[in-house]
Image (cartoon, helix red, strand yellow):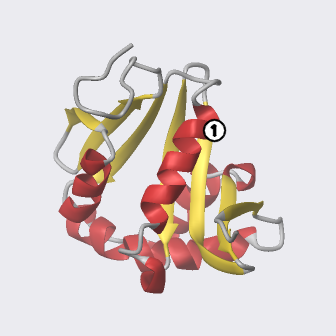
Amino acid sequence: MDRITFQKVTTCEYPSLFSIYKKYLYSAVETSFGWDEGYQIKRFSSTYKKEWFEWIMFNGERLGFICTKQEETAVHLHLLIIFDKYQKKGVGSAVIKYYQQFYSDRVTKCCLSAFKSTQQVVDFYLSLGYEIVNEDQYFVDMERSLCFNGYLGTKDKYI
């Protein structure tokens, strides 16, 4: 059976990630506070460590990448980029559900931030059970508990 797998980004591949980041986030950054190329390059390399990145793979093909950092009680989802031709096909949902399962015995919640200007991204995370816990002029901060709540997946079926 075919399934999505993950492959660590190598040291040689890491520099190429910025151009992908720029392609997918330029519009949101530009709309919010303007794109400064030098600043964005420096911010990318100082904020996102190579070890946090994994390629999202299917049958040897890259579908995008994810950047996560495990903290003491939470995992922070820094970036999830699904390449254009794989968007709206369930890849993002499958990746998020996999990571939620993967981290569920390590931390209690998953946290992320999304640009307010990307309402479809905010709606995507809301549809996966994330809640807005804070917001400012440009961002919404979202969280989702990874703790089992007793719900069995059918209406009114709790343990």
Q: What residue sits right under mark 1 in the picture?
A: 102
18 vs 156, left or right, is right
> Is residue 62 positioned above or below 53 on the image?
below
Residue 39 visible within the image: no
Of 22 and 121, which appears nearest the observer?
121
How busy is the neighbourhood of tag 1: few (under 14 within 10 Å), some, or many (20 plus)? few
Of 135 and 45, which appears nearest the observer?
135
**Which quadrant of the rendered structure holds the N terminus?**
bottom right
Residue 69 visible within the image: yes
View extreme (bottom): residue: 85
The picture places residue 111, in percent across and down from the top left corner, at 43, 35
View extreme (top): residue: 159
Q: Amino acid at mark 1?
A: Phe
60 vs 39, left or right, is right
The picture places residue 102, in percent across and down from the top left corner, at 63, 38
**Which quadrant of the rendered structure holds the C terminus?**
top left
120 vs 38, left or right, is left
Asked where in the image residue 20 lies, by quadrant, the reply is: bottom right
> Is residue 111 positioned above or below 108 on the image?
below
Q: Secondary structure at mark 1?
A: helix
Identified at 29% across, 56% down, the residue is 124
> Is residue 158 positioned above or below 115 on the image?
above
The picture places residue 152, in percent across and down from the top left corner, at 39, 27
Identified at 49% across, 47% down, the residue is 97
The picture places residue 85, in percent across and down from the top left corner, at 45, 86
**Could you tell me how many numbered marks the image carries?**
1
Identified at 53% across, 56% down, the residue is 95
